[in-house]
Amino acid sequence: MAVDKEPSIPLVPRLQQTSTVSGTVYNCALTVDFALTYFLVSGELERSNQPVNLIITDASGMSVLTAWAAGKFSSTSVKKTFADLDIENKIKNRTLIIPGKVAVMKGEIAEKLPGWNVVVGPTEAVQLPKYMKDKEYEAAAAAAAAEAAAKAANAPKEEVKELSFEELLATKVPAIEKVDMGVKYKGYNPESKTFVTIGERIHCISPVIRKAMDERDPAPILKRAAEQIAAGATYLDVNIGPAEKDGPERMMWAVKLLQENFDNVPLALDTANKKAIEAGIKVYNRTNGKPIVNSADAGSRISYIDLAAANDAICVALCSADGIAKDNEERMKHCHNMLERGMSLGMDATDLWFDPLFLVVKGMQDKQMDVLNAIKMFADEGLKSTGGLSNNSNGAPKTLRPIMDSALVAMAMMQGLTSAIVNPCDLRLMETIKSCDIFKY
């Protein structure tokens, strides 16, 4: 199926049937509004020749994993899509197939959609025809229904009291054991002009890190932190995902674990859960720099600027509004709106780090110069900038990613980029950053 829509422009959330027959009795499959993902999924579903209702949910035009990690694709957003599209009344079947890459969302979606049997589908679109033809979802749906019935029977009758941050810290956050990882954080001077490298490898997209966070197992997290600090990371990004159930205690544990083991290494607190960020800030040590709130945008997440302002934190400000900006005029409009909001709340302009949104080269090659030009526009106004630079090479062969990332960081630094969320264990990338710093300063 040809892609007749720019991948950077989100699709409109909707219910789509792959059969001309009334689809009220057919299963539902869930996908996001990222055009490339949609066309892959819908094409494979049509190839299966199995009737299904495809529900396209709002994820701000991001791919499945990226949107989930950014909090744009969550059980809450799925529930909203169901309400907006009136799915409950339009569809009689109660089986919902979710993307395999976000299997972790199964329980949360089931809680938000009582009566639905939520099952985990394949991780790749190309696996859908076999999955649908073999009706692999049937046994999973029956198991989901039995699980939901058992939970309902054992559900507590009393309302659970919400705990304060202090109570959570005292009762829900395990004691931190110091472990000698053989690495010392060397410190950070916020007044320095050198490039700020934010290590990206403590991220819940990784099954290893997600499991470690779920189980409060420090070893995998400490290992990745030590590797990044040894490689020269300035900050570490701590991405706990949406964490709708236990975000505050999860973030407090992660912040204390990392700072108490690595000389108060500065951190970027990365989640769509505002309470989790606030909780992390409560236990954060500022010896080596302010915490970074990751992230706000000019749309539904603009209040994250308020959170940063109230807590004297740095804020990553995505130059978008619930979707990727179509051009640099729109990017700068969002930039100025967020700058004005932050400064009206008493923030210094230097505490707003503007993110142009680095885009994947695969499918969006024509947008790369727009991103670089946007960085130059930020720099010309004396503004700081950052972003997930390694997004550009997503989907590329592993051997090519270091080449692409190092080339792009050099081009971006020459345009005025002051920071980036990257893999500091990429030696070629770090050598490039250090070399560019020498040329610039």
Image (cartoon, grey):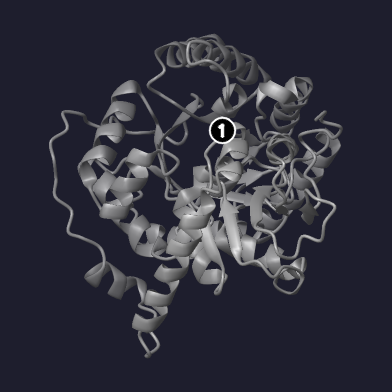
- The amino acid at mark 1 is Gly
* Disc 1 packing (10 Å; few <14; some 14–19; many ≥20): some
How many dots with numbers?
Answer: 1
Q: Is residue 255 above or below residue 84?
A: above
To which residue does mark 1 refer? 388
Q: Position of residue 138 (x, y in %)?
A: 52, 56
At x 26%, y 38%, the residue is 220
- Between 268 and 16, the one lying in front of the other is 16
Q: Nearer the viewer, residue 106 or 384?
A: 106
* Residue 418 can be seen in this image: no
Q: Is residue 82 above or below residue 13?
A: below
Query: Is 61 left, or right, of 330 in this rendering?
Result: left
Residue 198: percent from the left, percent from the top?
45, 33
Residue 167's place in the image compared with 432, above or below, is below
Please identify the residue farthest to the bottom as the structure is shown. Answer: 158
Tell whether 300 sits left or right of 71: right
Residue that appears at 61% across and 31% down: 126
Name the one closer to the observer, 43 or 257: 43
Quarter of the image for residue 114 reads: bottom right
Q: Residue at x 50, y 25 (%)?
A: 195
Give the left or right position of residue 323, taking residue 71 as reference. right
Q: Quadrant of residue 236?
A: top left
Judged from the image, the secondary structure of the residue bearing numbered disc 1 is: loop
Tell me the quadrant of the picture where the N terminus can be found.
top right
**Residue 389: in sight, yes or no?**
yes
**Residue 60 locus on image (x, y percent):** 70, 48
Residue 13 is situated, as x and y percent measured from the top left of the image, at: 77, 54
Residue 27's place in the image compared with 48, above or below, is below
Give the residue at the far front of this rendering.
134
